């Protein structure tokens, strides 16, 4: 296409318009898969992805984050690279930080695999996963659930 200029955007960027206010913190990860998984486990943030370690992590794409609080969650082995890019965000964001949480908790094997926050979140069994294993061990449990119309309740969200 003549005079075509592709402009990459952050995966999930459209969610910024739906964030209830500028007070909602934006979390940025590398992969789209990670943004989706993290959004399910940690819905307090607006999760966006750059599309890879380098992806669209540039000053043009980051302009949509103007005035926001942003936390970077790089994959293991990418933390230093993303720290070097913080000035791009600091020039437009209200506050920008780079989390080193994964670096602090990872084993050497996990570091060598370059795991991301989604990998760590998925290591934790969800209540649905635990219930499925219980039913697998004792199929009568499913009959009990069906007979009495029981449903799984997230205790933390009902309090």
Image (cartoon, rainbow, N blue to C red):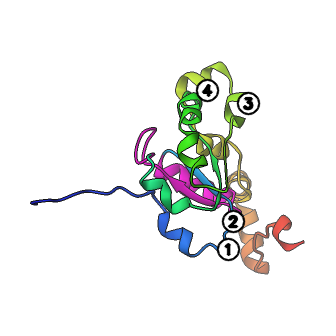
Q: Earlier in the sequence, mark 1 or mark 3?
A: 1
The residue labelled by disc 3 is: 105
Query: Do labels 3 and 2 touch, CB within 8 Å?
Result: no
Residues at circles 2 and 1 in contact by the CB criterion of under 8 Å:
yes
**Front: mark 2 or 4:** 2
Q: Nearer the viewer, residue 151 or 13?
A: 13
**Which numbered mark, 4 or 3, is in the foreground of this view?**
3
Q: Which residue is mark 2?
A: 24
Mark 4–mark 3 distance (CA, rounded to whole Å): 9 Å
Counting residues from the N terminus, which is met first, the one under dot 4 or under dot 3?
A: 3
Q: Earlier in the sequence, mark 3 or mark 2?
A: 2
Give the mark nearer the N terminus: 1 vs 4.
1
Percent position (x, y) of residue 156?
Answer: 85, 65
The residue lying furthest to the front in this view is 91
**Mark 1 → mark 3, Cα distance in angstroms:** 32 Å
Secondary element type, mark 4 = helix
Q: Residue at x 69, y 65 (%)?
A: 24
Coordinates of residue 110 in the picture (x, y in percent): 61, 26
Going 60% across and 24% down the picture, which residue do you hit? 111
Q: Residues within 10 Å of mark 1 (few under 14, many from 20)?
A: few
- The 10 Å Cα crowd at callout 4, few under 14, some 14 to 19, many 20 or more, is some
Nearest-to-viewer mark from 1 and 3: 1
Mark 3 to mark 2: distance in Å? 26 Å
- The C terminus, quarter of image: bottom right
**Nearest to viewer (mark 1 / mark 4):** 1
Q: Is mark 1 in CB contact (under 8 Å) with mark 3?
A: no
Mark 1 and mark 4: span between their CA atoms? Answer: 36 Å
**Sequence-wise, which precedes: disc 2 or disc 4?**
2
Stretch of the chain drawn in magenta: 31-57
Q: In this figure, which residue is indicated by the disc labeled 1?
A: 21
Which residue in the structure is indicated by mark 4? 110
Tell me what residue is drawn at x 55 percent, y 36 percent. 82
């Amino acid at each position: 296409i003549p005079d075509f200029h592709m402009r990459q955007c952050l995966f999930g960027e459209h969610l910024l318009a739906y964030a209830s206010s500028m007070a909602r913190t934006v979390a940025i990860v590398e992969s789209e898969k990670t943004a989706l998984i993290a959004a399910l486990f940690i819905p307090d943030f607006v999760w966006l992805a750059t599309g890879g370690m380098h992806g669209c992590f540039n000053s043009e794409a980051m302009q949509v984050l103007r005035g926001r609080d942003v936390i970077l969650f790089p994959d293991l082995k990418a933390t230093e690279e993303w720290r070097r890019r913080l000035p791009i965000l600091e020039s437009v964001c209200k506050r920008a930080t780079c989390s080193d949480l994964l670096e602090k908790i990872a084993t050497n094997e996990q570091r060598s695999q370059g795991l991301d926050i989604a990998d760590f979140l998925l290591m934790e069994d969800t209540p649905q996963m635990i219930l499925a294993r219980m039913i697998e061990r004792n199929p009568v449990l499913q009959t009990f659930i069906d007979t009495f119309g029981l449903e799984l309740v997230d205790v933390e969200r009902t309090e």
